[in-house]
Amino acid sequence: MTPQTALRELIDYNYRARDRQLQACAALSEEQFLRLLGASFPSVRDTLAPVVAVEWVWLERWQGRSPQALLAAEQFPTLATISERGGSVERVPSAPTGRAKPGPTSSGAPSSTS
């Protein structure tokens, strides 16, 4: 298995795991989604938001940008907004996934299509 194939498999696994989490939360009401739980993450929303925020940071870095902060949980008022953000990260053509395969530049770094 090549390193690129292994990376694509790990990324695909990450997306499948994320999608399973989101599907499991689909039955929650908005009140349940936002309810303060008194845990290390205050709510279900605050538990899920970092998942897509980190995917976004990873993608930004892959494309040569370096965000200074994660996306705030407050930017995701509903489960749908979290799902949409996760899907938008996954569909970026220059992301190194099994769904979109970037080619390396002459330096071996990933190419960017921005």
Image: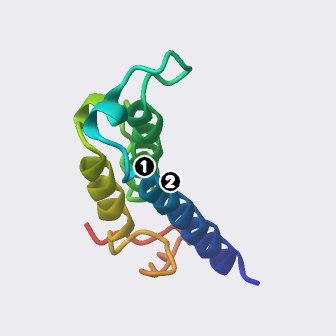
Q: Nearer the viewer, residue 5 or 105?
A: 5
Q: Which of marks 1 and 2 is in front?
A: 1
Q: Is mark 1 on a helix, strand or loop?
A: helix
Q: Which of 114 and 10 is in front in this view?
A: 10
Q: How many labels does the image show?
A: 2
Residue 84 location (% of width, % of height) = 27, 57
How dense is the environment of label 2, judged by Cα within 10 Å: few (below 14), some, or many (20 and up)?
A: few
**What residue occupies the far right of the structure in this picture?**
1
Question: Which residue in the structure is indicated by mark 1?
Answer: 25
Q: Are marks 1 and 2 in contact (CB under 8 Å)?
A: yes
Question: Which residue in the structure is indicated by mark 2?
Answer: 21
Residue 87: quarter of image: bottom left
Residue in the image at 44% along x and 41% along y: 48
- The type of residue carrying mark 2 is Gln
- The type of residue carrying mark 1 is Cys
Residue in the image at 28% along x and 31% along y: 31
Whether residue 41 is visible: yes
